[in-house]
Amino acid sequence: MKRFDVVILGAGGAGMMCAMTAGNRGRSVALLDHAEKVGGKIIISGGGRCNFTNVEAGPKNYVSRNEHFAKSALSRYTPADFIALVEKHGIAYHERKHRQLFCDVSARLIIDMLVRECKEAGAEMFLKHAIKGVRRADGGFVVETDHGEFASGSLVVALGGLSIPKIGATGFGYELARQFGLRLVETAPALDGFVFSESDRQKLSGFEGIAIDASMSCNGISFRENLLFTHAGLSGPVSLQASLHWYKGDEVAIDFVPQLSREALLEWFWARRSEKAELKNLMGDLVPKRLAERFCELYLPGVATLGNVSKKDLEAFCDRLKAWSFVPACTVGYGKAEVTRGGVDTDELSSKTMECKKVPGLYFIGEVVDVTGWLGGFNFQWAWASGWAAGQAV
């Protein structure tokens, strides 16, 4: 049996941040993972360049049953702190829209940085160690693996969620939470595309590959980003953002002309009533031609030019363009979802240390916790912040 002060399950971003933080405090640390390599999600993020944080990350950018829980960790380990670490290692990066930060070269540099920091802090990594079980013993914990047992006074669960199983995601972190009597908030795939119902698929069939600037709203939250039509429904950044706030049966609304208010759109049409061009051709200045043609077929059937449209019908048509609503059948699922919404109920944890209130010495960090960020570097910032907070306490 190998003995350490701290055993961390999961060598992703949160786990490595916790390991280096605890190691730098003089704690002996073992980092266990069933995978052959560390940082599976880091390497595939941001198109291989890792959207490692967002300059403006704050509690408002996260979904949780307790909207205040993330404040403590996020305020004590900020984007500026991680940026300083990146700059310390000489990693070149750049800022994109919405204050997202990416590596100039490769996400591999972020992984190498974290591995180097862990080694310098004395944390030991044990990869290709399948975890078979965890039990309480001698006031601490014993982790059984296929390579022997590891004992520690503190145990940190950084096993992530169910998203992207092809890189090793499992539900084992949730199983451990249940084993120790912790409540879970229902999980769901998030930052994910929407799948149309059959009726909506028929309405908007044949649009695969069309991309458009659009605004999407769900449960009172709106985002404006690129919208992409797929063979199954909708994807693109705006769909991914909205999916984080969507629950089965909820309605989603799309504004296909976000650059104009409803009144301005109506005026735009009204000013062109005398033109003899077909309505669907005039609309080519607003939306892609195929979408314009379909909307005319669906909502102004038999109408060729604007001169034949009454003001009442034109107002209704504008309403459709500005707030086309649908109820998704589902999202694409965990296979492509970037994150898992839900997880360990934050009421079970200390917001300062991430320690379980009723199981001293047991900590949960990162995606396994019911704190889920928007698209754009926010989930990595939660991984860094929650890992750092636990690393200061274990």
Image: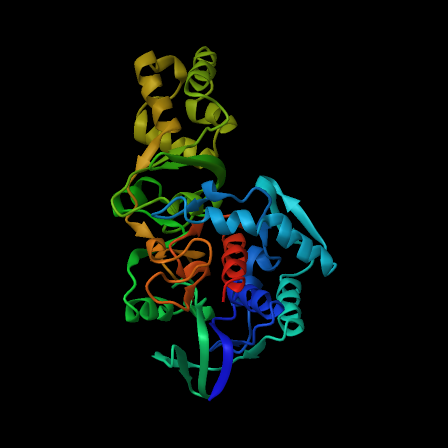
- Residue at left 56%, top 62%? 42
Viewer can see residue 236: no
Tell me the colour scheme of the image: rainbow
Q: Viewer-proximal residue, 345 or 240? A: 345
- Residue at left 51%, top 61%? 387
Extreme residue toward the front, this view: 139
Give above or below for 149 relative to 26: below
Left or right of 82? Residue 278 is left
Percent of width and height locating residue 157? 43, 68
Percent of width and height locating residue 366? 46, 60
Viewer can see residue 288: yes
Number of numbered discs visible in the structure rendering: 0
Left or right of 182? Residue 237 is right
Q: Viewer-proximal residue, 71 or 129? A: 71
Q: Viewer-proximal residue, 195 or 84? A: 84
- Residue at left 43%, top 81%? 130
Give above or below for 206 relative to 270: below
Left or right of 331? Residue 111 is right
Extreme residue toward the right, this view: 90
Residue 335's image quarter?
bottom left
Q: Viewer-proximal residue, 197 or 295? A: 197
Give above or below for 271 relative to 197: above
Residue 141's image quarter?
bottom left
Percent of width and height locating residue 363? 42, 65
Percent of width and height locating residue 125? 56, 78
